[in-house]
Image (cartoon, coloured by chain):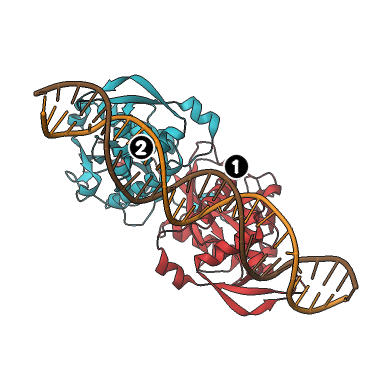
Chain colours: A red, B cyan, C brown, D orange
Amino acid sequence: MDINSYKSYQKILVAVDCIIFGFDGEHLKALLIKRGFEPEKGKWSLMGGFVGKDENADEAAARVLQDLTGMENIYMEQLYTFSDLSRDAAGRVISIAYFALINIAAYNEQLQREHEAKWFPLNKIPSLIFDHRKMVMKAKEMLRQKVANHPIGFELLPTKFTLPQLQSLYEAIYETPFDKRNFTKKMLALGILNKLNEKEKQSSRKGAFYYIFDIAKYQKLHSNGAKFV
Amino acid sequence: MDINSYKSYQKILVAVDCIIFGFDGEHLKALLIKRGFEPEKGKWSLMGGFVGKDENADEAAARVLQDLTGMENIYMEQLYTFSDLSRDAAGRVISIAYFALINIAAYNEQLQREHEAKWFPLNKIPSLIFDHRKMVMKAKEMLRQKVANHPIGFELLPTKFTLPQLQSLYEAIYETPFDKRNFTKKMLALGILNKLNEKEKQSSRKGAFYYIFDIAKYQKLHSNGAKFV
DNA sequence: TCAAAAGTGTTCTAGATACACCCATGT
DNA sequence: ACATGGGTGTATCTAGAACACTTTTGA
């Protein structure tokens, strides 16, 4: 703050934009919508909204996410604030970007149709309005960093998942294959997965055992992160 | 964005606040100012300012930093955006926090007096206005993470520095002692330090060789980070 | 019986850690 | 001569990487 009074400064429109990641078992995807209003109507865009006078940015982002997905308690984290003068064609708007991780299978098809939303693989993101492409790229980078040290990958999977599914997810995030034995070894060594006495039989004849993430065990061990990759 | 027009949303005052880190050879410190205007006049605070209509947040932060330090080209990075409804006692203001690293020895004493600024060791931060304490803590966390993978520690030291100085810095950042032999070994193994044929003789009789950071070598090796701790 | 994916151990290598003595110099 | 901080090497341990075969079962 400098010595000028608050009043001599101009207020600015503040938006949030959400990069919503999902994983379909093969590709890491982002949920985009066809923008329904001007400017740039009809173009692909991130889901966003303005920050209202009675909410903070986290609340605004959660509201936007709920509008689009119908879900609450989505994993969500602030990413970065974009403030270039001409980033929004309609005027000065700064945008606080959030990234969110959801279980793609739980996503409501109905809402998808209502919003004209679509999942795009990260390597096939269409042309986006404004600086949204930059946001997606930054979110992807942050996802990689976070996943390496925090057990957030599980947010992208169903409650019950198999080790091959988990591995596919990590391979999709890092765009690189991992050795099955080493991967399994490391994940199990973390001691935060509980094996269920039940198999997933869709994707193979033999079937793969389901696991669940044991959040209690995780929190006991290392509240501030451990190495996941 | 939702279907409402931009106009139906309220604009918000947008500020930047800077967490400025320095290292005096022993302690990691943050530069704080005595706030010169209401509300909370006379209390300790981060240096901040509003984002003007003709600048983006990075530019605003750079301007604020230059006001306080007289320096340009300071290492600076966006940290997080704080937007709680009641974070500023004077009204709704969101603040984009930045952290900056400067060579404390190059800091202009004159400006320090003008701004009633003072360096505080990180473990002796006084009571701060608003949510500034949260900002400082978050900045400290980010500094640790960044320093581990990026050669930004050098920003806190003079151009010429000794290995004992570098080690003290890392020890201050991580609040933990390192083994001298292992530290030296690792730093030299990175291959990004150039030994000068010149010694620093203030702090010991024998004297310690000066080194300089070789940014060119660093960039050649790994543009996207390496392990520094 | 065979195709397709799941499951499982050992060896090797590199990086991290632990550890103690001599060196250079100013007083 | 001695006190102070600077400089250096080796042995051990641990985590990560490389690598191939057997198991299960539906078709």
Whole-percent x, y for residue B139 in the image: 35, 46
Name the amino acid type tagged 2.
Answer: Ala
Residue B21 is drawn in which quadrant? top left
Q: Secondary structure at mark 2?
A: strand
| Amino acid type indicated by mark 1 | Phe
> Image check: A60 left or right of A200?
left
Dot 2: within a 10 Å radius of its alpha carbon, few (fewer than 14), some, or many (20 or more) residues?
Answer: many
Q: Output the chain of dot 2.
A: B
Q: Check disc 1 and report its element: helix, strand or loop.
A: loop
Looking at the rendering, which quadrant does residue A160 occupy? Answer: bottom right
Can you tell which mark lies on residue B100? 2
Foreground: disc 2 or disc 1: 2
Taking depth in this image into account, of A54 and B77 the one nearest to the observer is B77
| Position of residue A179 measured from the top left corner of the image (x, y, whole percent) | 65, 56
Work out whether disc 2 and disc 1 sit on a shared chain: no
| In front of the other: B123 or B200 | B200
Q: Is residue B19 left or right of residue B3?
A: left
Picture residue at 52% right of the left edge, 58% below the top:
A228
Residue A130 is labelled as 1
Q: Residue at x 56, y 41 (%)?
A: A88
Q: Nearer the viewer, residue A138 or B8?
A: A138
The single residue placed furthest to the top in the displayed view is B197
Q: Which one is in front, A100 or C6?
A: C6
Compared to B71, does A62 lie above or below?
below
Could you give the CA–CA distance between mark 2 and mark 1, rounded to whole angstroms?
Answer: 28 Å
